[in-house]
Image (spheres, rainbow, N blue to C red):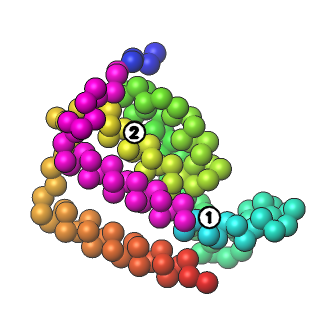
Amino acid sequence: MAVYRPAMSHPTARPTQTRLLCIVYAVIAAVALAATWSQNVAYFHSPTGLLTFWSDTKVNPASRSITVDIVLFFLAAAIFMVLEGRKHAIPYVWAYLLGGALVAISVTFPLFLIARQLRVGPSETTRLSAVDATILAVLSVLTIAFVIWVDAI
């Protein structure tokens, strides 16, 4: 049974770390939406576009590998999202999962993480070491560079 927990009553009282993390998640979701759908629209010009899309996910070992990787990540994320959604009384958990299947899990998972972050208490936030923050920053830059490289036509 879900337990109702009201959202924080003073959104302006959120810690800087929470606001910053929500902004980072929002940027990831926006970039993911642009990067995935800039490719997905190529399949809208044909009535068989959806079938062609799924067929193309099996074209070669690389596409099969990344497809299986994403599907299994989706499963792990779904379990996490439902459990955390119930734990923190996050509404519309199944909408995030449906959106992940219809839009992109790389879009809806960060949106779910925003909803989760806004529900957890300030004492539940984690402080990163300088090393962790630096490595995450480098990983972020490399990820954006990779997305641009892959998404370039």
Say what amino acid the circle numbered 1 marks: Trp
Q: Secondary structure at mark 2?
A: helix
Query: What x and y, as percent, mark residue 84?
Result: 39, 34
Please state the horizontal and vertical placement of residue 42, each as a whole percent of the image. Answer: 72, 71
Q: 65 or 102: nearer the eye?
A: 102
Residue 37, numbered label:
1
Q: Residue 112, relative to residue 70: is it above or below? A: above
Q: Which quadrant of the figure has residue 143? A: bottom left
Is 13 located above or below residue 66 in the figure?
Answer: above
Q: Residue at x 67, y 66 (%)?
A: 40
Q: Which residue appears at 67% of the width and 76% of the height?
A: 60
Q: Confirm whether the magenta stretch covers residue 117.
A: no
Q: Main secondary structure of the magenta part?
A: helix
Residue 114: percent from left, percent from top: 38, 44
Label 1: how many Cα within 10 Å (few below 14, some 14–19, many 20+): few
Q: Is residue 40 above or below residue 121?
A: below
In this figure, which residue is indicated by the disc labeled 2? 115
